Image: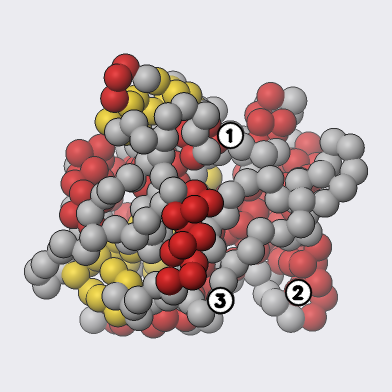
Amino acid sequence: MGKKIVVLGGGTGTYTVLTGLKKYPLEITAIVSMADSGGSAKKERDEFGMLPVSDVRKALLALAEEEGRRGLLRELLNYRFSKGVGVKGTTFGNLFLVALSEILGSQEKAIEEAGKFLGTKGRVLPVTLGQTSLVAEYDEGVTVEGEHEIDEPLHDGRLGLRRVYLRPEVQANPLAIEVIREAGLIVVGPGDLFTSILPVLLVKGIAEELSKAEGKRAFILNLMNKFGQTNGFTASRYLGELEKHSGLGFEHVLVNSTQLPEEILRRYAVEEGSFPFEDDLDGEAVIRGDFLSKQIYEAQAGDKLKRSLLRHDPEKLAKVLTELLED
């Protein structure tokens, strides 16, 4: 096992972890969510009958070379159209992956070839090869289907979220099971608990394999609670929901202990109704530290989805994670 790390999740959280880890001599595999239904994912599903590619694209770009011609290709695939009927808000990388899948006749082959084009320092695997949707059940009998509809609620976002599940149930990608078995360290998060992390862990076979894997398991806690999902959560509530939904516990839990900037917290409160969580954890499993990036992230031109203003620092996370692997 040794130098093999598996990162599970999706979105900017997984992107951040991979960006830091690729600078180390490691065998890295990203296993990403296939439950996305927002933005271009709806077209990819409905019009092309494909699995959503946004989380795949982000993971590929995180692991890609950043210098020379491949660096330029990386920028190209990350380009988001800010105008144009039918393409506004879409990234070129998503269109590229759809077209490459059509040419090769397989999304799996397209992801593999895209990794070669980009010179990725690791592999990216869809958690499942089956089509599925995320369903959430809330207080007062409210049920919502679709990751995007859960992530940016049209219903009353103050309702408590009781549970999420996949419909239909889907089997894990066999390659994902294989790399989990061989990993020395398995990293889950950061990311929105119900829409980025649990959609990976709920795929049939993933949690079961993680529970008996020989590698260590580390969970990276988000920096902020998410309105409509984790309103008022404490740190221990995150771990409780993970265990309730997947049966998993973690040997290590990384928690940022650095003060978040007041100006940005005010923006979160006003613009999103989101607030920091209470750190109520104790025990040797908890690793606290300064994991906060100093950069404030604003949305790209043309991006219609809400993005995190605050993010973890890739290098700070990678340092701790590689130390856990070596220990």
Q: Secondary structure at mark 2?
A: helix
| Left or right position of 73 against 295 | right
- Picture quadrant of residue 277: bottom left
Residue at 25% across / 37% down in the picture? Answer: 245
Residue 184 visible to the viewer: no
Kindly identify which residue carries mark 3.
295
Q: Position of residue 169 (x, y in %)?
A: 40, 25
Cα–Cα span, label 3 and label 2: 21 Å
Of the image marks 1 and 2, the number of the one nearer the N terminus:
1
Please tell me whether mark 1 or mark 3 is closer to you in this view.
Answer: 3
Residue at 32% across / 72% down in the picture? Answer: 256
Amino acid type of the residue tagged 2 in the rendering: Gly
Q: Are marks 1 and 3 in contact (CB under 8 Å)?
A: no
217 vs 53: above or below: below
Q: Position of residue 279 (x, y in %)?
A: 21, 64
Please tell me whether mark 3 or mark 2 is closer to you in this view.
Answer: 3
Checking the image for residue 70, the label placed there is: none
Q: Secondary structure at mark 3?
A: loop
Amino acid type of the residue tagged 3 in the rendering: Gln
Kindly identify which residue carries mark 1.
37
Q: Residues within 10 Å of mark 1 (few under 14, many from 20)?
A: many
| Left or right position of 74 against 31 | right
Viewer-side residue, 86 vs 56: 86
Kindly identify which residue carries mark 2.
71
Q: Secondary structure at mark 1?
A: loop
Residue 243 visible to the viewer: yes
Q: Residues within 10 Å of mark 3 (few under 14, many from 20)?
A: few
| Residue extending farthest left | 283
Residue at 44% across / 41% down in the picture? Answer: 195
| Residue extending farthest right | 84
Of the image marks 1 and 3, the number of the one nearer the N terminus:
1
